[in-house]
Image: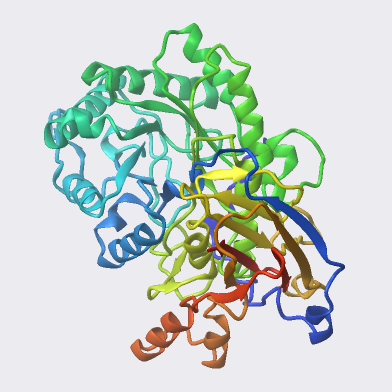
């Protein structure tokens, strides 16, 4: 892999992108439906457990941002609609957190003041840390290797492995003393972030990361064998098979495997092929790759935790800020079901500064909530998908997901996903001409069999007319700094309206879904 090519584009502001939406099409394109697609749903069919793996963990901006009121506001809002349990962020060892220092004689000095405020705040909101152990404190670094992120973390290996071991020991001992082993044993400890990219300056990358992992895992387990540790936290679904072999052959503790991928990663980087994999298929194909590597390894029962994913690693307003994310998320859930314990969407909030200080509400940030507390369509998509049941009923469709709740009622997700791919393929940012493309209304005919309960369908939508603040924002003239009154209007415009209630006709329901629409239907 060529490092200069694959520094994630989220590290820079892509000024060339404009707020152009996939739904800006002619009325004829939007109103002309495709032939109806019938989906037969047997309400009494056998089902398999359907864990809500997509909403148990979220990523966020770096550690110190969690002290901000705006961060905590957004965390509480997303907690309310998803009930998520874990949050993961970079840079708990960044010098701005102040955990590690050295005195004039180079003796380590530890300060857990900000650390306690960070973790106390998460726990007070009902969310546990998924602890990413990164990056290198300046005085512990072997050299100064600053990452291009706006806050410039040092990605150097340690100058002294004994001091690194001591940092991990003192850090984890403090957590156990403050919160108790029964609590901290429910956390996860992930060693570093994407060491196969420019987040790790050790050379050779893989073998020096093995050193980092070995020291870290053993130090954690010496504090308590109940602490859960894993890695390799790689980008592009890399290294998992080699990592497991290394741990087995060297008797290194390993409790879970983690990796990352984004919808517009390139197949050459993820699979070593020249395929053109659409962004709505890349994530789950990469997850399956690592899932299968684990199953064929000497430790086939290791949990797989996907600690970063999204539809794009670029700042693409037409993707991550748009209604596209609703059907993309639903289809990702459909494909990834059964492959991983948890998937951590990157991120829950645009309180986020990898590219620098946020300059406007909608810039293609990764969060569910935009600057100013404005929920995006992705926020509303997660809110609707949270309503899915805890059993999945198989159906013959790639755009319908059928679930059953404990009370036997059905909840169905249906969507009309249009894949907006740039001319250059994956790894290329979308530009205006490529976004204005055709898309047709999709008609889906649902036929329910053996219904024993309700006969009404409660239909909730996320599309351009439901749960999307952009039409209101555009009418305002797209202000870069909305006033408080404008922010309130945008927040209100982003709210989901009450569901449309329709009677089933002979157990049947027909939906006309505009491009990029997501519908969640509750049968009551």
**Residue 353 as seen in the image, left or right of residue 271:** left
The residue that appears at 34% across and 26% down in the rendered structure is: 228
The residue that appears at 48% across and 87% down in the rendered structure is: 479
Q: Is residue 355 positioned above or below 294 on the image?
A: below
Q: In which quadrant of the rendered image does the N terminus lie?
A: top right
Residue 381, picture quadrant: bottom right
Residue 136, picture quadrant: top left
Q: Give how far across and how far down residue 402 sits, in percent.
A: 63, 51
Q: Give how far across and how far down residue 25 sits, in percent.
A: 77, 81
Asked whether residue 343 is in view, the answer is no
Q: Nearer the viewer, residue 170 or 380?
A: 380
Q: In this figure, which colouring scheme has been used for the structure?
A: rainbow
The residue that appears at 57% across and 52% down in the rendered structure is: 310
Q: Is residue 257 positioned above or below 242 on the image?
A: below
Q: Nearer the viewer, residue 31 or 359?
A: 31
Residue 275, picture quadrant: top right
Q: Nearer the viewer, residue 510 or 293?
A: 510
How many tags in the picture?
A: 0
Asked whether residue 470 is in view, the answer is yes
**Residue 343 as seen in the image, left or right of residue 41:** left
The residue that appears at 53% across and 63% down in the rendered structure is: 524
Q: Give how far across and how far down residue 182 sits, in percent.
A: 20, 30
Q: Give how far across and how far down residue 493 sits, in percent.
A: 48, 83
Q: Is residue 379 positioned above or below 466 on the image?
A: above
**Residue 264 as seen in the image, left or right of residue 69:** right
């Amino acid at each position: 892999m060529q490092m200069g090519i694959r520094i994630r584009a989220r590290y820079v502001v892509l000024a060339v992108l404009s707020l152009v939406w996939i739904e800006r099409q002619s009325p004829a394109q939007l109103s002309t439906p495709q032939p109806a697609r019938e989906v037969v749903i047997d309400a009494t069919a056998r089902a398999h457990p359907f864990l809500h793996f997509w909403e148990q963990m979220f990523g966020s901006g770096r550690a110190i941002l969690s002290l901000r009121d705006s961060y905590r506001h957004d965390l509480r809002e997303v907690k309310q609609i998803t009930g998520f349990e874990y949050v993961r962020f970079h840079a708990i060892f960044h010098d701005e957190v102040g955990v590690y220092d050295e005195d004039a004689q180079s003796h380590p000095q530890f300060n857990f003041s900000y650390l306690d405020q960070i973790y106390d705040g998460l726990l007070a909101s009902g969310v546990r840390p998924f602890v990413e152990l990164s990056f290198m404190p300046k005085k512990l670094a072997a050299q100064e290797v600053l990452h291009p992120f706006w806050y410039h973390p040092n990605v150097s290996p340690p100058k002294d492995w004994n001091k690194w071991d001591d940092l991990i020991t003192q850090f984890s001992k403090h957590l156990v003393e403050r919160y108790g082993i029964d609590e901290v044993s429910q956390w996860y400890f992930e060693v570093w972030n994407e060491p196969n990219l420019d987040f790790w300056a050790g050379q050779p990358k893989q073998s020096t990361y093995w050193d980092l992992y070995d020291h870290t895992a053993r130090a954690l387990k010496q504090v308590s064998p109940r602490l859960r540790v894993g890695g390799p936290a790689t980008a592009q679904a890399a290294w998992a098979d080699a990592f497991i072999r290394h741990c087995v052959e060297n008797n290194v503790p390993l409790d879970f495997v983690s990796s990352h991928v984004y919808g517009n990663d390139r197949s050459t980087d993820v699979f070593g092929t020249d395929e053109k994999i659409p962004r709505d298929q890349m994530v789950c194909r990469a997850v399956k790759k690592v899932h299968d590597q684990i199953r064929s390894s000497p430790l086939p029962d290791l949990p797989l935790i996907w600690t970063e994913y999204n539809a794009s690693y670029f700042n693409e307003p037409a993707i991550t800020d748009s209604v596209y994310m609703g059907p993309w998320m639903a289809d990702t859930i459909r494909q990834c079901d059964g492959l991983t314990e948890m998937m951590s969407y990157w991120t829950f909030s645009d309180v986020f500064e990898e590219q620098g200080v946020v300059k406007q509400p909608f810039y293609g940030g990764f969060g569910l909530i935009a600057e100013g507390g404005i929920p995006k369509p992705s926020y509303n998509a997660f809110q609707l998908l949270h309503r899915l049941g805890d059993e999945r009923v198989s159906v013959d469709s790639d755009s319908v997901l059928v679930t059953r709740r404990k009370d036997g009622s059905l909840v169905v997700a249906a969507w009309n996903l249009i894949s907006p791919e740039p001319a250059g393929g994956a790894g290329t940012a979308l530009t205006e001409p490529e976004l204005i493309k055709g898309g047709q209304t999709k008609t889906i005919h649902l036929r329910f069999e053996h219904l024993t309960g309700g006969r009404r369908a409660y239909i909730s939508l996320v599309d351009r007319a439901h749960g999307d603040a952009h039409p209101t924002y555009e009418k305002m003239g797209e202000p870069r700094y909305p006033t408080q009154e404008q922010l309130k209007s945008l927040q209100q415009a982003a709210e989901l309206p009450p569901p449309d209630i329709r009677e089933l006709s002979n157990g049947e329901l027909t939906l006309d879904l505009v491009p990029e629409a997501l519908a969640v239907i509750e049968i009551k």
